[in-house]
Amino acid sequence: MEKTFALRPATPDDLSAIVGLIRELADFEKLGHLVEVTPESLRPHLFGERPAAEAIVVDLGSSVVGFALFFQNFSTFLGRPGLYLEDLYVQPAHRGAGIGKAILRHLAAVALARGCGRFEWSVLDWNSHAIAFYERMGAAVMAEWRICRVSGSALNDLAADGEAASPQA
């Protein structure tokens, strides 16, 4: 008998499961060495006084088998908010059951309900299965755009340079 899955907003009780899925995702992306997140470090950003992000989880029976973490951003060109999907992950054993499609449809509905002008995310260029899936769902893969990132010591250095250049009051 095939079990049905359910999407629901994450709760603090899901933090350990979410972090476990984040680690699985990072390993899949060959980026496990970069993972620093813990349930304790994630808690204030999902459930604190000023949450920076939201998450939904996928229940299958009594197990959480997938998640999506997202947040609102803003498009200056549209003059409207957008919804950014930071991560979507479904455990390999549960792929092909419509879970990813259900997550994307759910988040598209969230974006529309919030008056967002767009819903976007990034995908690794080598992940051809994900790219094909996203294109089937109607996404345009924007090859002409590149992600810029400053982190770690480079972020500290950039901030220090900015502090030195800031006008004094």
Image (cartoon, rainbow, N blue to C red):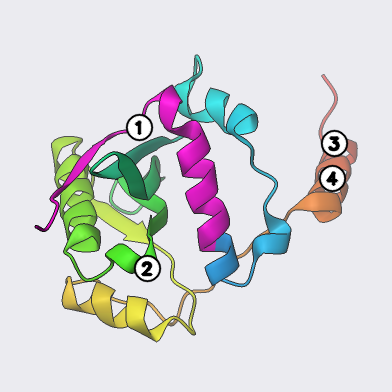
- The mark found on residue 163 in the picture is 3
Task: Write down the quadrant of residue 7 in the picture.
Answer: top left
Q: Which mark is residue 92?
A: 2
Q: Is residue 155 left or right of residue 99?
A: right
Is residue 123 something one can see in this rendering?
yes
Q: What SS does tag 1 mark?
A: loop
Q: 48 above or below 91?
A: above
- Reading the image, the residue beneath label 4 is 156
Please identify, in this view, whether the residue under mark 2 or under mark 4 is nearer the observer: 2
In depth, the one of 90 and 129 nearer the eye is 90
Image vertical order of residue 150 relative to residue 169, above or below: below
- Front residue (pair 99, 123): 99
Query: Which numbered circle lies on residue 41?
Result: none
**Amino acid tagged 1:** Ala
Residue 20 included in the magenta stretch of the image:
yes
Q: State the extent of the magenta-drawn residues as a range.
A: 1-25
First along the sequence among labels 1 and 2: 1
Q: Which residue is mark 1?
A: 10
User: Does the magenta segment cover residue 138?
Assistant: no
Compute the Cα span from label 4 to label 1. 32 Å
